[in-house]
Image (tube, grey):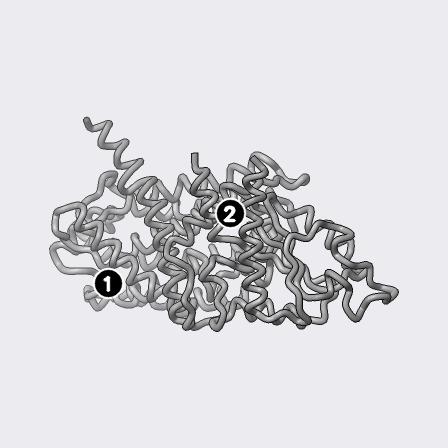
Amino acid sequence: MFEKLIEKGLEKSAWLYHLNTGSCNGCDIELVSVITPRYDAERFGFKIAGSPRHADIIVVSGPITSQSRDRLIRTLAQVPDPKVVVSLGSCPRSCNVFNGSYCVEGPLDKYTPIDVSIAGCPPKPEAIMAGLVRAVEILKEKRRAMK
Amino acid sequence: MELLKTILYILLYPGLIYCVIGGLILSGIDRKLLARMQKRIGPPILQPFYDFFKLLGKETIVPRNAAKKAFLAAPVIGLISLITVSLFIPVFKFSPFSTYADLIVVIYLLTIPAVALIVGGSASGSPYAGVGISREMVAIISYELPMVVSLLAIAKKVGLALNNGVMTFSLAQIVEYQAQNGPLFTKISIIPAFIAMLLVIPCKVGSLPFDIAEAEIEICEGPLVEYSGAPLAIFKLNHAIKMLVMTSLFVTLFLSGAGTGILVVDALIQFILIIIVMFFSITLLKAITARLRVEQTLKFYWTYPTALAFLSLILVYFGL
């Protein structure tokens, strides 16, 4: 009944959940700068949610450390469908400078398929916005595929 | 014909559809105004509608150690009680369900959404929800006292004029008094209660300086932490409607009057007044303050607003 409205809603209101898996805090600060008055991601409906149950887009930053690996898997399982996984920065894709460390068990695609990856160390806020807009398109495709 | 009219009241104007659309638009205006005050462009005014329909389309997860029936019923109970409150609040002289003591009904029904939040949170079985519901209880304890005392002041003030000195709890009579003597907030004895009630609204709807129960960045929205999909959508709707109902009650209590007699015009004037009240009591406070701690909230409410409300009650008894 509300199919059209739901699709419009998905397009206009995607809530982010930010998951830090041992990041150096650089990407985290850049993500926060996206919701500041200068870039204002809320005008596209993006909002940072406190709980993974409320989220549509999971933003993962950091190489996966052994401490955070189980938490990552459990958090991803808690997110309701349809969901999109976004990797933020170089770390989740390649482990960056932490590659080869005894406590790093990345990259992220060993544990979950990645839908959008935003490159940079740290990425620019403009790049993050572009990546999130792309993630919303994928979210819509996933919703269509669910039916 | 009477039956048809009643159904129309319940479904259309002061009831379901008005509450849903009015509440969501009001919370959209709130978000837009807040964004403009922070020099942002802000989300479109229809943003709460998008959020609502998106959440309807998401998967609903019930946690394994949750009490399923209470978990899913809690938001609906809250929604129903809020819509019932809206039926009792007169819009100027239009009051479809006016009874002898509807103010007491309104006070009790306004508590139910908070109780529904507590039930839903405790049914979800999450530790964050546990912290959230204990804070919600503290919030209820803190705002109920000044609210009830300031309502008593109004009841006595109106009762002295219209009900042979006995307190009146009829909202229709309160409106009648204002139609004869001008809005209540212009009376010297009611001004302290006016300010107290203005301070009660943000805690009642859980907006920023007093949103201890749903602190987003502190305890992940407290009781709502395990909710997803349609039940979360209804809780968000409850939040928006609570804002509409509280400000609407405020307008009826303090800023009402004879009105124009045409329902559409009256409803429009009421909504504009609601937006103005919301701007001062919710949006402005949200933009300029940070969150208080739990015990600070309790201390604040039991000192200044309660003192103001009692001052008002005493002034009414002195006949000012």
Relative to residue B240, is residue B65 depicted above or below? above
Identify the residue at horizontal 19%, vertical 48% (top origin).
Answer: B173
Verify CB contact (< 8 Å) between mark 2 and mark 1.
Answer: no
Kindly give the residue lying farthest to the right in the view shown.
A102
Q: CA distance from mark 2 to mark 1?
A: 36 Å
Residue on which the image places disc 2: B117
Chain assignment, label 1: B
Q: Nearer the viewer, residue B271 or B116?
A: B271
Q: Nearer the viewer, residue B189 or B282?
A: B282
Expressed as whole percent of the image width and height from the top left, the position of residue A95 reads: 77, 64
Expressed as whole percent of the image width and height from the top left, the position of residue B82 reads: 38, 44
Q: Amino acid at mark 1?
A: Val
- Residue B197: name its quadrant: bottom left
Q: Please say whether residue B130 is visible from this viewpoint.
A: no
- Relative placement, left or right, of B12 versus B186 is right
Identify the residue at horizontal 66%, vertical 71% (top origin).
Answer: A122
Query: Under tag 2, what secondary structure?
Result: helix
* 2 or 1: tag closer to the N-terminus: 2
Q: Nearer the viewer, residue A108 or B277?
A: A108
- Relative placement, left or right, of B8 versus B31 is left
Q: Please say whether residue A85 is visible from this viewpoint.
A: yes
Q: Amino acid at mark 2?
A: Leu
Residue on which the image places disc 1: B316
Q: Nearer the viewer, residue B194 or A59?
A: A59
The crowd level at tag 1 (other Cα within 10 Å; few <14, some 14-19, many 20+) is many
